[in-house]
Amino acid sequence: MLIESCPAPNPQELHGQWIGINKGFGPALVGLTQDVKQFKPIRSQCADGNNLMVEQVPICDLRSHGWQPKLSILTKEKQELGNFAVSQTCGDLELDYSKAQNRWFDPARYLVDELVQVDDGLLLGRANLQFGCVRIPLAYFTLSRRPCNECDECTE
């Protein structure tokens, strides 16, 4: 299986936005088949980030209409959710939502994503529900580097 055989990505190379497609029972249940993961610059050996909600479109329309930010009805700001901390142990890379600042009622606090690099600019992840030592796989997702002309970071 790719998750077990591929190497972890270099955390220093994750900075920026990655567009994602989610597959599995969990994403289908909540209607979240696409999202954007935003990785912030590494500061003092720690990296973190969050998920950016996007308008959900059929898979066949992703190329022409996909990954448009979902705006809050009240504030008209981009909707962000699921803050995560990037941790690397024993060569594995994880996005741990329990170690980041999430509200106490946010179910994302029980998520840990495993992340591997399949190819340059292509990552594979497995989202897991974690309660103590028990880890239950929920879904798989792919992430690909978002082209600079499509993100907010083109000014860097």
Image: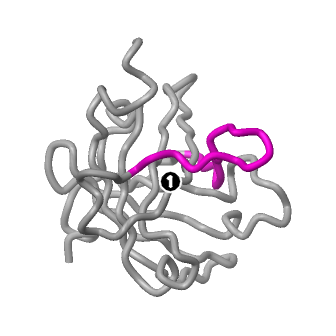
The reply to whether the magenta stretch includes residue 20 is no
Task: State which quadrant residue 33 falls in.
Answer: bottom left
Residue lying furthest top: 156
Which residue corresponds to the image point at 39% horizontal and 38% vertical from the top-left?
A: 11
The reply to whether the magenta stretch includes residue 74 is yes
The quadrant of the picture occupied by the N terminus is bottom left
Residue lying furthest left: 119
Q: Give percent across and percent down for residue 100.
A: 69, 48
Task: State which quadrant residue 77 falls in.
Answer: top right
The quadrant of the picture occupied by the C terminus is top left
Q: Give percent across and percent down for residue 37.
A: 47, 47
Crowd band around label 1 with a 10 angstrom C-alpha radius: few (<14), some (14–19), many (20+): many
Magenta region's main secondary structure?
loop
Label 1 sits on a secondary structure element that is loop
Which residue corresponds to the image point at 26% horizontal and 34% vertical from the top-left?
A: 147
Left or right placement of residue 35 versus residue 102 in this view = left
Residue nearest the viewer, comparing 92 with 22 = 22
User: How are the residues colored?
Assistant: one colour
Q: Give percent across and percent down for residue 118.
A: 18, 56
Q: In this view, does 60 lie above or below 70?
A: below
Residue nearest the viewer, comparing 2 with 31 = 31
Which contiguous range is marked in magenta?
A: 67-85
The amino acid sitting under disc 1 is: Val
Which residue corresponds to the image point at 56% horizontal and 23% vertical from the top-left?
A: 43
Q: Is residue 39 above or below residue 153?
A: below
Q: Give percent across and percent down for residue 98.
A: 69, 59
What residue does disc 1 label?
54
